[in-house]
Amino acid sequence: MSAPQALQVTAIPAFADNYLWLIHDQQHAAVVDPGDAAPIEAALRSLGLKLNAILLTHHHADHAGGVAELLAQWAVPVYGPAGENINGVSRPLREGDRVDLTALGLQLSVLDVPGHTSGHIAYVAAEQHWLFCGDTLFAGGCGRLFEGTPAQMTKSLAKLAALPDDTLVYCAHEYTLSNLRFAVAAEPDNADLTSRLAQAQQMRERGESTVPSTIGLEKRTNPFLRYREPSVLQTMRANGRLNSDDPVAAFAALREWKNGFR
Ligand SMILES: [Zn+2]
């Protein structure tokens, strides 16, 4: 028997700006949010991997659209949110559940993070300090509230912000530059943020991915984790976007502002 290889996470770009995440040990693989099967099949072939599991964070087609095609090739369990009706899910999950991928030696715990969709879940690999958070937390931003409320989203983001600072944030889109441009508008005097934007611009010019980020960096620079900071509140009050002391109202106003920001 060969010695077990260290687990690694590989980004599989898909569509305009999605990242599908392949977790593997050179032999076995699990895929997070396979919106498209073709690039996953190509990666499995070129890396010589056997698919062992599919993990879904929420029902949107750019996250779950490749499931049926993958299942036609691979008889594997499909983990997904118990609170959403997704074709192919065989292992419905809710907060507190654990996923034990024995072939990979990987254990994940599940968090309920409603807001972007009503049943959205996130996967935490506590040993590796990895977070797979779909469209809940982005590098420099957060998902739009399509189904959930601002109150739900603030609670969901607080759960993610409570993870260790060195947790790698594997979110599902390369939205970082536009998120950080908005972040600078919301908090112009945050030096960590302006240097992050400059760094992200250089990375994108070199064609590099800005994901994963870390929870520590998000806490220092992401306005959707910083909506209670006086600096952010002051900007929103100064431009007439906030006339309340309620933190959820501040979060909602910030999200509204971002929705219309170009
Ligand atoms: Zn989505």
Image (cartoon, grey):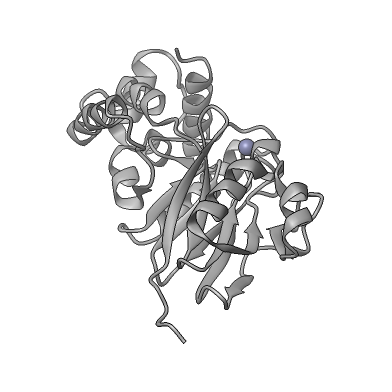
The answer to which quarter of the image holds residue 220 is: top left
Image quarter where ligand 1 lies: top right
Quarter location, residue 229: top left
x 30%, y 51%: residue: 216
Seen from the viewer's position, the closer of residues 149 and 32 is 32
Residue under the point 44% across and 30% down: 175
Q: Residue at x 33, y 19 (%)?
A: 185
Image mark count: 0
Image location of residue 138, percent across then percent down: 45, 39
Front residue of 113/213: it is: 213
Q: Is residue 33 visible?
A: no
Q: Position of residue 199 (x, y in %)?
A: 22, 32
Please give left or right for residue 55 compared with residue 230 in the image: right
Residue at 53 percent across and 27 percent down: it is: 16
Q: Is residue 160 above or below residue 136?
A: below
Is 177 rendered above or below residue 108? above
Q: Would residue 40 appear left or right of 190 to someone viewing this image?
A: right
Residue 145 locus on image (x, y percent) = 61, 33
Image vertical order of residue 163 relative to residue 96, above or below: above
Q: Quadrant of the C terminus?
A: top left
Q: Residue furthest bottom?
A: 1
Report whether residue 158 is seen: yes
The percent position of residue 194, horizontal first and vertical second, equals 22, 28
